[in-house]
Image (cartoon, rainbow, N blue to C red):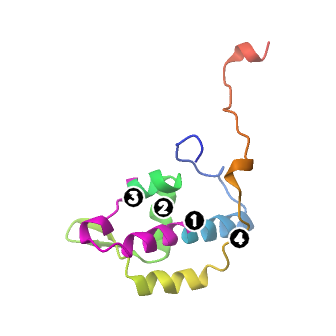
Amino acid sequence: KIEKKTGSPEKPLSDLGRVSYESFWARSLLIKLREMSNKPIAEDRMISIDELAELTAFTQQDIKATLDRLQILLYSQGQFYINANPKIIDYHLQKCGGEGVPVDMTKIHWTPHLTSDRWLR
């Protein structure tokens, strides 16, 4: 997220890893969708999977799989759409559990991964 790139964990995931990531992805996406559904202007409530990927840094594949698993990614008349009904979102959020451990982003010290071989000499 700091790099402004989408990413995903290394695959294959263990059973516990899969459950943990799916819960994290679901909660994060549902919170973003709830924020969008609360906007007063209808056009502001529209969001694409690409926009969700930019906001969350999740890959489009992980977003699609999560929304499909939650049964809120629907297909009709040749197009996919996200059913962001607030009642459905709140229902799923209740099932996702707590928010987890808060992270203070100011405490993260990050440096980009260097891939040049000149650093290996």
Q: CA distance from mark 3 to mark 1?
A: 13 Å
Q: Amino acid at mark 2?
A: Ile
Q: Residue at x 52, y 47 (%)?
A: 6
Query: On the image, numbered disc 4 is attached to which residue?
Result: 100
**Seen in the image, is 77 located left or right of residue 106?**
left
Q: Residues within 10 Å of mark 2 (few under 14, many from 20)?
A: many
Residue 118 image-quadrant placement? top right
Which is more N-terminal, label 2 or label 3?
Answer: 3
**Seen in the image, is 59 located left or right of residue 103?**
left
Query: On the image, numbered disc 1 is attached to which residue?
Result: 25
Q: Nearer the viewer, mark 4 or mark 2?
A: 4
Query: On the image, numbered disc 3 is attached to which residue?
Result: 49
Q: Are marks 3 and 2 in contact (CB under 8 Å)?
A: yes
Most foreground residue, 64 or 52:
52
Q: Are marks 1 and 2 in contact (CB under 8 Å)?
A: yes
Residue 49 image-quadrant placement? bottom left
Q: Is residue 40 visible?
A: yes
Query: On the image, numbered disc 2 is attached to which residue?
Result: 63
Q: Nearer the viewer, mark 4 or mark 1?
A: 4
Q: Residue at x 30, y 74 (%)?
A: 40
Q: Are marks 4 and 2 in contact (CB under 8 Å)?
A: no
Which is more N-terminal, label 1 or label 4?
Answer: 1
Q: Callout 4: helix, strand or loop?
A: loop
Magenta span includes 82: no
**Seen in the image, is 18 located left or right of residue 89?**
right
Q: Amino acid at mark 3?
A: Ile
